[in-house]
């Protein structure tokens, strides 16, 4: 349903940037992507229960997967939400990628977002010249990526992209989407060989069958669309940073890169819990149970006194160490190690005390589990699991709160 919430946050950042400079905000629909494991699951939080719908999708690009066989399952899973006019519009999509694009348009179209589907019949031919050029020297872009990867590795970095010997940056769609390799003047997808002439003919007949890999996709995007800024997430930022050589190969400058907004949504019950314990929701997203334990110290009777006693003991050990150093300087390091061990063991015991107390306190345990369901579902940040459309369907003001949010950094969106 529009992907996890980070999808809407990325669109929000693009919309905010475009508004500042009077540009258009385009959202690239990953219809060429065949990693169905990333798109076949939908998680919703309904009646304090994490519910999941998993579709048995074929290993095809999202733009080739018909939505009709799954429409009823999605409609049933969404329940009464499927009758919302925005959702009903999205459910009319013919393919999985069109369902996604329609969802974006239904919820963010009023702000000017333009979904761009590179596999759309009228748009795929725009990439034909770039693909023809890549076929002329099919290993050049892969070599450029590997060279940049080596440079990053020499600087101590860990580049995410690397091309195997003979690997190109092109996929060919047959019964599946397969990476093309090039050797001795011919291409192969691991099943059969193709001459350059055959691939050019496929390209002219159906340009959507030949598609760029991740190491080429941003460059093709910028060849076709005059891109001033490219909004990315942290992981995308790492791989796009490897593409400077590919951009140079095609003679175009890299666009400015902008990290998307990160956000956490607080529905009324969760807002009350974080307020009660003076808990920073982002501290919980980052630290989980440890952050909650730190926050509940104030409400556990006697805990502060015990913590103060440990601090006093550590101060006494520090003073004792100074006296020992005055008598014998070689004792300084052993006393420092002793204090560090005492501090670590003391903190471990205090944390164990909190956990034991929480295990006996039904209210504390209930609040912790509720925070996990809302803010760290499946052990992941909320923005990577639940769709923002879920909040928009449950709270009419959700889209307005998103619109009011900053376009970068971290934001907390309080609803209700």
Image (cartoon, rainbow, N blue to C red):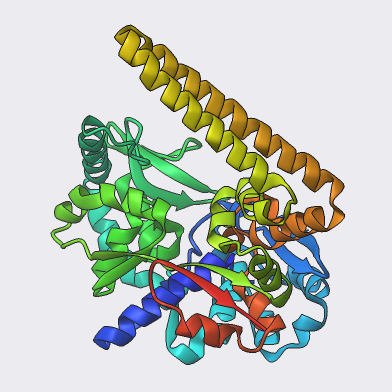
Q: Quadrant of the N terminus?
A: bottom right
Q: Nearer the viewer, residue 211 or 11?
A: 11
Q: Nearer the viewer, residue 18 or 369?
A: 369
Q: Is residue 370 left or right of residue 17?
A: right
Vertically, is 43 above or below 396? above
Q: Nearer the viewer, residue 241 or 209?
A: 241
Q: Position of residue 285 (x, y in %)?
A: 57, 56
Q: Image point 72% across, 88% down: which residue?
A: 84
Numbered disc total = 0
Image quadrant in which you'd find residue 351 = top right
Q: Is residue 60 left or right of residue 139?
A: right
Q: Nearer the viewer, residue 194 or 80?
A: 80
Q: Image point 59% across, 34% down: which residue?
A: 310
Q: Is residue 243 left or right of residue 32?
A: left
Q: Is residue 38 left or right of residue 255?
A: right
Image quadrant in which you'd find residue 381 = bottom right
Vertically, is 44 above or below 192? below
Could one spot residue 58 in this view of the protein? no
Q: Position of residue 386 (x, y in %)?
A: 65, 65
Q: Position of residue 263 (x, y in %)?
A: 51, 68
Image quadrant in which you'd find residue 46 = bottom right
Q: Image point 78% across, 74% down: which residue?
A: 78
Q: Quadrant of the C terminus?
A: bottom right
Could one spot residue 241 in this view of the protein? yes
Q: Image point 76% across, 70% down: which residue?
A: 74
Q: Position of residue 116 (x, y in %)?
A: 43, 75
């Amino acid at each position: 349903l529009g992907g996890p919430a980070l999808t809407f946050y990325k669109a929000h950042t693009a919309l905010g940037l475009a508004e500042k400079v009077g540009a258009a905000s385009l959202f690239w629909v990953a219809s060429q992507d065949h990693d169905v494991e990333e798109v076949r699951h939908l998680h919703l939080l309904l009646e304090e229960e994490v519910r999941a719908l998993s579709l048995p999708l074929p290993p095809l690009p999202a733009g080739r997967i018909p939505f009709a066989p799954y429409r009823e399952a999605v409609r049933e899973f969404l329940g009464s939400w499927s009758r919302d006019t925005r959702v009903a519009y999205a459910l009319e999509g013919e393919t999985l990628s069109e369902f996604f694009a329609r969802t974006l348009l239904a919820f963010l179209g009023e702000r000017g977002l333009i979904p761009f589907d590179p596999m759309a019949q009228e748009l795929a031919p725009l990439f034909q010249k770039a693909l023809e050029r890549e076929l002329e020297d099919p290993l050049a872009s892969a070599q450029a990526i590997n060279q940049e990867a080596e440079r990053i590795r020499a600087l101590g970095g860990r580049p995410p992209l690397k091309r195997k010997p003979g690997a190109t940056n092109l996929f060919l769609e047959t019964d599946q989407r397969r990476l093309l390799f090039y050797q001795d003047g011919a291409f192969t997808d691991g099943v059969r060989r193709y001459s350059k002439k055959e691939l050019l003919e496929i390209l002219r007949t159906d340009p959507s069958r030949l598609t760029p890999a991740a190491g080429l996709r941003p460059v093709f995007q910028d060849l076709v669309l005059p891109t001033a800024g490219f909004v990315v997430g942290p992981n995308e930022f790492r791989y796009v940073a490897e593409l400077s050589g590919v951009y140079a190969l095609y003679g175009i400058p890299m666009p400015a890169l902008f990290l998307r907004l990160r956000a956490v949504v607080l529905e009324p019950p969760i807002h009350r819990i974080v307020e009660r314990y003076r808990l920073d929701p982002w501290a919980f997203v980052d630290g989980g149970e440890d952050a909650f334990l730190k926050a509940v110290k104030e409400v556990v009777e006697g805990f502060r006194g015990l913590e103060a006693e440990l601090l006093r003991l550590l101060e006494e050990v520090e003073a004792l160490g100074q006296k020992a150093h005055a008598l014998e300087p070689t004792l300084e390091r052993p006393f420092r190690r002793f204090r560090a061990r005492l501090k670590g063991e003391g903190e471990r015991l205090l944390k164990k005390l909190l956990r034991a107390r929480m295990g006996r306190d039904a209210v504390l345990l209930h609040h912790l589990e509720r925070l996990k369901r809302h803010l760290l579902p499946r052990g992941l940040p909320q923005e990577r699991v639940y769709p923002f459309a879920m909040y928009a369907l449950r709270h009419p003001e959700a889209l307005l709160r998103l619109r009011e949010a900053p376009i970068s950094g971290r934001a907390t969106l309080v609803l209700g």
